[in-house]
Image: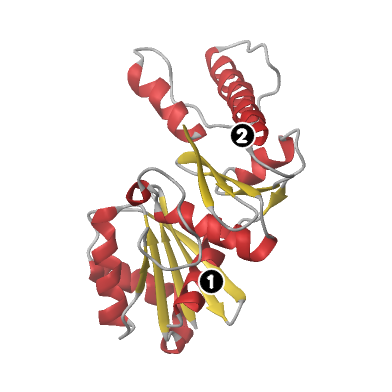
Amino acid sequence: MLLALDIGNTNVTVGAFVGSQLKRMWRMQTDTAKSADAYGKLLLGFLGQSKDAVDGVAIGSVVPKLTPVFSQVAKKVFKTKPLVVDYRSKLGIELKVDKPSEVGADRILNALAAFKMYGGPAIVLDFGTATTFDCISEKGYYLGGAILVGPRLAAEALAEKTAKLPKVEFAKPRRAIGKNTVECIQAGLYFGYLGMIERVLDETLKEMPGTPHVLVTGGFGELLGPLLSRKSLRVPDLTLQGLRLAYETQGV
């Protein structure tokens, strides 16, 4: 069994693979104060009786403080040296950007999975704490993309940076013309966010050669993906699949 760990700013997403099949997926809240022992206990609870079947661990992290923590979990709990994916990993995806070291592991993994599973050209929209656009050429080159504030983060910023506006859940509103403060915020966030995404996607498509696949992943992908005017494919486990493919590519 391969244990794939996608360490994000909001959640750590855990996938258990047997061969190419994702058998189980689980999320736990990201907490930089937690120790390796604490995370180890959580993972053992998730795996239950199958904990002894783990013979490999792959890590993709955008939280630098937690990368060594989970590496320690792999070594201490599962007795294996983990594969930690970053811009230096040899995955067959060449980073055609100004500073490869600035490309997050999640974006590299999304690009890898998109190209290996669906071919290029492709555009990946990952709706997480931040929303990212990642572009892959027909030959598998990572071309760059865009980074936007995520919908939940936008809602939190409104509440934190204003004196009277409350924090609201990002959700589809009943109407565009709100009749109270909560409805007004929800309408602005929802329709404004959709408009922003559509514009960035339109401009991205203008610069992309060929007819790219549009793949949607991330926590808000289920809500927002079907609303895009362009045809898209929802792939909720794309980043985890990237970790599996990275592990296989490295021949670990």
Residue drawn at x 38%, y 43% as measured from the top left: 98
> Badge 2, how many Cα within 10 Å: few under 14, some, many 20+?
some
Residue drawn at x 61%, y 56% as measured from the top left: 236
Q: Which of 173 and 218 is in front in this view?
A: 218
Residue 217 point in image, percent of width and height: 60, 50
Residue 241 point in image, percent of width and height: 56, 66
Quarter holding residue 82? bottom left
> Mark number for residue 245?
1
Residue 143 point in image, percent of width and height: 52, 46
Q: Which of marks 2 and 1 is nearer the N terminus?
A: 2
Is residue 137 shown to the viewer in this render? Answer: yes
**Is 249 rendered above or below residue 238?**
below
Residue drawn at x 58%, y 82% as measured from the top left: 19
**Is 149 rendered above or below residue 106?**
above
What separation in Å lies between label 2 and label 1 (alpha carbons)?
26 Å
> Mark number for residue 222?
none
Q: Name the residue under label 2.
A: 204
Q: Which of 152 and 98 is in front in this view?
A: 98
Residue 10 shown left or right of residue 123 in the figure: left
| Residue type at tag 2 | Thr
